[in-house]
Image: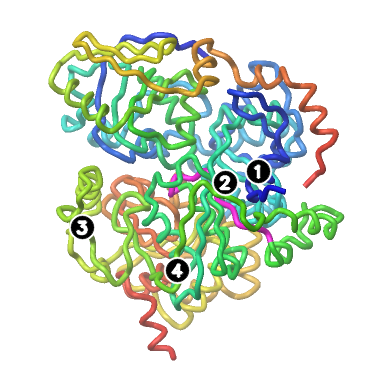
Amino acid sequence: MTPHTMFEKIWQAHVVHEEPGQPSLIYIDRHLIHEVTSPQAFDGLRLAGRRVRRPELTFATMDHNVPTTARSLPIEDATSALQMDTLSRNCKEFGITLFDLASPEQGIVHVIGPELGLTLPGATLVCGDSHTSTHGAFGALAFGIGTSEVEHVLATQCLLQERPKTFLIEVTGARPYGVEAKDIILSIIGRVGTEGGNGSVIEYAGDTIRGLSMEERMTVCNMSIEGGARAGMIAPDETTFAYLRGRPYTPKAFDAAVARWKTLPSDPGARFDRTLRIDARSLTPQVTWGTNPGQVVAIDSRVPNPAELSDPNARKSAERALDYMALRGGTPITEISIDRVFIGSCTNSRIEDLRRVARFVKGRRVSSRVYAMVVPGSQRIKQKAEAEGLDRIFKDAGFDWRESGCSMCLGMNPDTLKPGERCASTSNRNFEGRQGKGGRTHLVSPLMAAAAAVEGRFVDIRQYELKEN
Amino acid sequence: MEPFRTLDGLVTLLDLPNVDTDQIIPKQFLKRIERTGFGQFLFYDWRFIDGTRPNPDFEMNADRYRGAKILVTRANFGCGSSREHAPWALLDYGFRCLIAPSFADIFYNNCFKNGILPIRLSEDRVEALFERVRATPGYRLTIDLEKKTITSGDGLAYGFEVDEFRRLCLLNGLDDIGLTLQHEEKIRRYEASHTAV
């Protein structure tokens, strides 16, 4: 029998209709929606007099522009409030389950999907958000779609899709201390570039990947889109099954489901269109210096000098980025001081991320020059963190402890940088103005962000190992 | 969706690679619940100083480019967020055709759903277009989707490739949902046999 990749198995199991010269019609098992990219889709349905085909397969939450101040306070921004009300009305009209601001299950759509067991191995899952790639950590085929496609899924539970190419990234070897999942994916993006994965689904494999927790796997898959790939995936295994067992929306016949899920991993000898191998032992903590996630270097190196770049496009891009970031080529990364720290986002706001940060900041203080905030990814995470006393540790160290949402990852709510402010951020995009007009974003791991908060500048987290041992 | 057959239009330039959808339409404008009216916010932080005065350093703001329907730009245009507000803003501003060496996947898809034709050309050809447009005020191109050609009065003639299915959908302004619903019977059969995950 021909060996197949995990992607091929899932794809093939979801083809509803195929004919030569046309995209495939594939079935969608789970559809997640939020307030920003859904209103126009529901309008489209109403305009055409269409219904939602399978309302029980779509789940909604509010995350992008929700305030992270106390839930008891009114929403000051009227347009944000209208967008949230619109989602509530649409969900009610079309019979869709909604986790709204009052719900104990509310949170970032890519955090609550896995948390509630809505994200399952072997499933197709889509959402009107590019970071839907996150859910691939469970061995699902998960990707972001536009609003027209949201409408298409609501109306038909299917999508017309070109079959993507496959890209295997194998990471092997023991990770050095201080190298987090975030550093693995930032290193990968630095290598393949921001469009290296265009047209592809990435499968991350190798013993380093297999050794990651589910939270860490989600961090890796989450940023696949920053390397241009719509989807990233990791084969399900005992780590996956243990994470899912007992979660509310998982199959009742769980063991039978596990038996099916065990057939998903790529067969030995399966062919990928492209392969990249990375030695984890060579990886270092990463910091972005520019205005796209591919503009990234090791903490112990310097801001690149554009004049030394041979590709004219890369040079032009670097010059512009340095100008925006107010950085000079040749500056050591550890000499860059910061004003703000953001710990949160669908990349790094899960309980494990918060535990690691708390362990580091316990007994330390946020620099007096820095305003630092921790935004848990969901209400469940917030409750859990508080039950474990993490909130006390954060507050004692000088962090602001907030309600759950996307927050300053994209600054649609009031959490934004002021012009010229520089931020160490655990989020996924360092685009110009992403966290606020004129704001300067450096992407880092949660540990590196915590260390930067304490020192007021970027520091090599590996130094602390020496101090503490 | 409005069909796209041929387009004759003024060409404008955006000389940057990796233009992300956060630049095409910044987040503060994503709170509208309609599909229309986004053109005024296109490239907002680059087009305007303090949100009011046009930025004279932004090439597209020059008078000679007013009314452009075709945008020529650099590699990986439309990367980042999946927001369909990006093609809505481009369309509302007046663009029906984008030409670049490459586009990000989700954005590329979103363009076709809105009657915008994104054309991939080699780096060399895009560079040649940049030179011709800059050297010739009022430079126009004719895009013929039926013949898959790009031509200009100065003798320039390029062919381009586009997926046949997408081409037919654009030519006829076809609605994807309508097409899919023709397979209702197959969808029902799939649902009957599909093991829930």
Q: Would you name the residue on which mark 1 appears?
A: A125
Q: Are marks 2 and 4 in contact (CB under 8 Å)?
A: no
Residue type, label 2:
Thr
| Identity of the residue furthest to the front in this view | A1
Earlier residue among tags 1 and 3: 1
Chain letter for mark 4: A
Q: From mark 4 to mark 3, how far is it between C-alphas?
A: 30 Å
The colouring scheme, among rainbow, by chain, secondary structure or one colour, is rainbow
Q: Nearer the viewer, residue A171 or A212?
A: A171
Q: Position of residue A176 (x, y in %)?
A: 45, 77
Left or right position of B23 against B182: left
User: Quarter-wise, where is residue B188 in the image?
Assistant: top right
The answer to whether residue A65 is seen in the rendering is: no
Earlier residue among tags 1 and 4: 1
Q: Are marks 2 and 3 on the same chain?
A: yes
Residue at x-position 39% and y-position 87% = A466
Q: Which mark is residue A132?
A: 2
Left or right position of B22 against A120: left
Residue at x-position 22% and y-position 8% = B153
Chain letter for mark 1: A
Residue at x-position 47% and y-position 69% = A180
Residue type, label 4:
Asp
Q: Are marks 1 and 2 in contact (CB under 8 Å)?
A: yes
Q: Are marks 4 and 3 on the same chain?
A: yes
| Identity of the residue furthest to the bottom in this view | A469
Q: Position of residue A45 (x, y in %)?
A: 66, 22
Give the residues drawn in magenta, as a range. Answer: A226-236
Q: Would you name the residue on which mark 3 appears?
A: A327
Q: Would you name the residue on which mark 4 appears?
A: A279
Q: From mark 2 to mark 3, how far is it between C-alphas?
A: 32 Å
Closest to the camera, between mark 1 and mark 4, is 4
Residue type, label 1:
Leu
